[in-house]
Image (cartoon, rainbow, N blue to C red):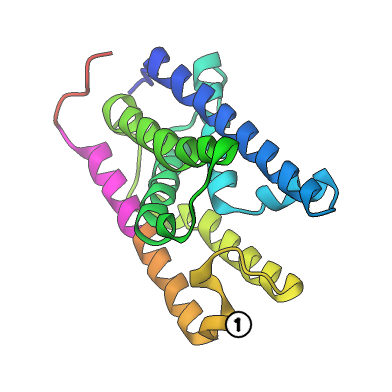
């Protein structure tokens, strides 16, 4: 089946994703300068978060779709995997992280775009207008590479720097057993969402009009 990209919604998602990333980088660079560190350190710190990296994926795939670029970024399996990743970004932030801080200014703009607007718009597009009939039941296992690689990176980052990027992955505060359990639960969540994506791909209801 062919990809029907719904250009208006994809363009909006791409623009908001790039805007959110720019706002986050500016906020992080400003914070670094205020604390006497180089702006580059703030930018690299921002790019260490799963939220930012996954929104970057969304920005790249939506831009590639709008531009009509060939694979790999526009492959149905990539579009579906990114939908599951960005859904988890919004879900985990809403359930576990939103209450931990109160962003303001440019950081608030980045927060709303990266955790709310972009996840919602991309998932809505993928559910309504993404390609169908092209996924296999084994593909969600391959999609686990991204979150698993990030989890390993987050643990290594925390061990080397002494600062863990997410509270549920804080080995110093929780212990390795609890963090391992949290990681396993997240992988289960990604797997369930991946299987749900394949089920949606194989559903026989008509696609949304394009």
Percent position of residue 158, x then y: 67, 71
Q: Main secondary structure of the magenta part?
A: helix
Which of 129 and 123 lies nearest the eye of the viewer? 123
From the viewer's perspective, tell me whether residue 93 is left or right of residue 196.
right
Q: Nearer the viewer, residue 34 or 130?
A: 34
User: Where in the figure is residue 124, as x and y percent of width and height?
Assistant: 31, 31
- Indicate the secondary structure of the residue bearing disc 1: helix
11 is higher (above) or lower (below) than 87: above
Quarter in which the C terminus is drawn:
top left
- Can you give x and y, in whole percent of width and height, for residue 46 in the image? 66, 48
Q: Is residue 164 above or below residue 17?
A: below
Q: Nearer the viewer, residue 25 or 4?
A: 25
Residue 118 versus residue 30: which sits nearer the camera?
30
The number of discs equals 1
Looking at the image, which residue is at 75% across and 73% down? 160
Tell me the magenta residue range: 191-204
Residue 10, image quadrant: top left
Q: Quadrant of residue 57?
A: top right
> Residue at 48% of width from left, 51% of height from top?
102
Are there few (<14), some (14-19), or many (20+) residues within 10 Å of tag 1?
A: some
What residue does disc 1 label? 172
Residue 19 vertical placement versus 156 (above, below) = above
Figure quadrant of the N terminus: top left
User: Does residue 69 appear to the left or right of 10 in the view shown?
Assistant: right
* Residue 148 rendering spot, x and y as whole percentages: 54, 63
Name the image quarter holding residue 76: top left
Whether residue 73 is visible here, answered yes or no, is: no
Is residue 84 at all visible to an observer of this figure? yes
Q: Is residue 18 above or below residue 194?
A: above
């Amino acid at each position: 089946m062919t990809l029907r990209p719904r250009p208006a919604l994809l363009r909006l998602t791409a623009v908001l994703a790039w805007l959110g990333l720019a706002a986050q980088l500016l906020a992080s660079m400003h914070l670094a300068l205020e604390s006497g560190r180089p702006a580059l350190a703030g930018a690299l710190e921002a790019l260490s978060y799963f939220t930012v990296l996954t929104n970057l994926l969304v920005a790249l795939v939506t831009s590639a779709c709008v531009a009509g670029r060939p694979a790999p970024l526009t492959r149905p399996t990539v579009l579906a995997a990114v939908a599951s990743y960005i859904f988890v970004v919004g879900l985990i932030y809403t359930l576990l992280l939103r209450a931990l801080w109160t962003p303001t200014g440019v950081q608030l703009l980045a927060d709303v775009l990266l955790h709310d607007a972009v996840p919602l718009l991309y998932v809505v597009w993928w559910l309504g207008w993404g390609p169908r009939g092209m996924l296999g039941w084994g593909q969600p296992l391959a999609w686990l590479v991204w979150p698993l690689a990030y989890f390993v990176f987050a643990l290594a980052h925390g061990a080397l720097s002494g600062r863990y990027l997410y509270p549920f992955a804080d080995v110093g505060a929780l212990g390795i057993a609890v963090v391992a359990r949290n990681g396993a639960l997240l992988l289960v969540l990604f797997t369930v969402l991946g299987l749900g994506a394949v089920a949606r791909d194989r559903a026989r209801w008509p696609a949304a009009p394009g």
